[in-house]
Amino acid sequence: MSETLNRLAEIIESRKLINGGDPDTSYVARLFAKGDDAILKKIGEEATETVMAAKDARRDNDSAKVLYECADLWFHSLVMLAQFNLTPQQVLDELARREGISGIEEKAARKDELRDADESNKH
């Protein structure tokens, strides 16, 4: 599974302007040239389209559009990761770290970490 993500991440990385990506010939290079806000806006659009496709799938009992839109969302998320010099493997590692941890416990731990960091910044 991660081989596909890694290959795609390598292609996306090659489209960065510093790696020779050309905004005139590459959609991804064009996103990189526009910067963070354009990439984040695109993720928001794709997330909304994924949600709407899921609602339609529930109504129509046809999940084909969910798959298509989720692929778009994942793709643009990979572009965002590359923008911030992160990799799909790092996401997979984070998911593995969370494996076996209750979602409720994990969320509470994050709140505790944020609270502790906020308190240490005040001192």
Image (cartoon, rainbow, N blue to C red):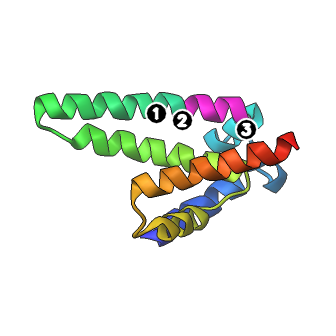
Res 7 seen here:
no
Neighbours of disc 2 within 10 Å: few (<14), some (14-19), many (20+): many
The vertical placement of 109 against 25, above or below, is below
The vertical placement of 85 against 61, above or below, is below
**Residue beneath disc 3:** 23
Which callout, 1 or 3, points at the residue further toward the start of the chain? Answer: 3
The image quadrant of residue 19 is: bottom right
Which span is picked out in magenta?
36-43
- Which residue appears at 41% of the width and 47% of the height? 71
| Dominant secondary-structure state across the stretch colored magenta | helix
Neighbours of disc 3 within 10 Å: few (<14), some (14-19), many (20+): some
Query: Mark 1, mark 3: which one is toward the viewer?
Result: 1
Q: Are marks 1 and 2 in contact (CB under 8 Å)?
A: yes
- Which residue appears at 56% of the width and 31% of the height? 42
Q: Which mark is residue 46?
A: 1
Q: CA distance from mark 1 to mark 2?
A: 5 Å
Image coordinates for residue 31, horizontal then vertical, percent = 67, 36
* Left or right: 77 in relation to 53: right
Res 98 seen here:
yes
Quarter that holds the C terminus: top right
What SS does tag 1 mark?
Answer: helix
Neighbours of disc 1 within 10 Å: few (<14), some (14-19), many (20+): many
Which callout, 2 or 3, points at the residue further toward the start of the chain? Answer: 3
The image quadrant of residue 85 is: bottom right
**Residue beneath disc 2:** 43
Q: Amino acid at mark 1?
A: Glu
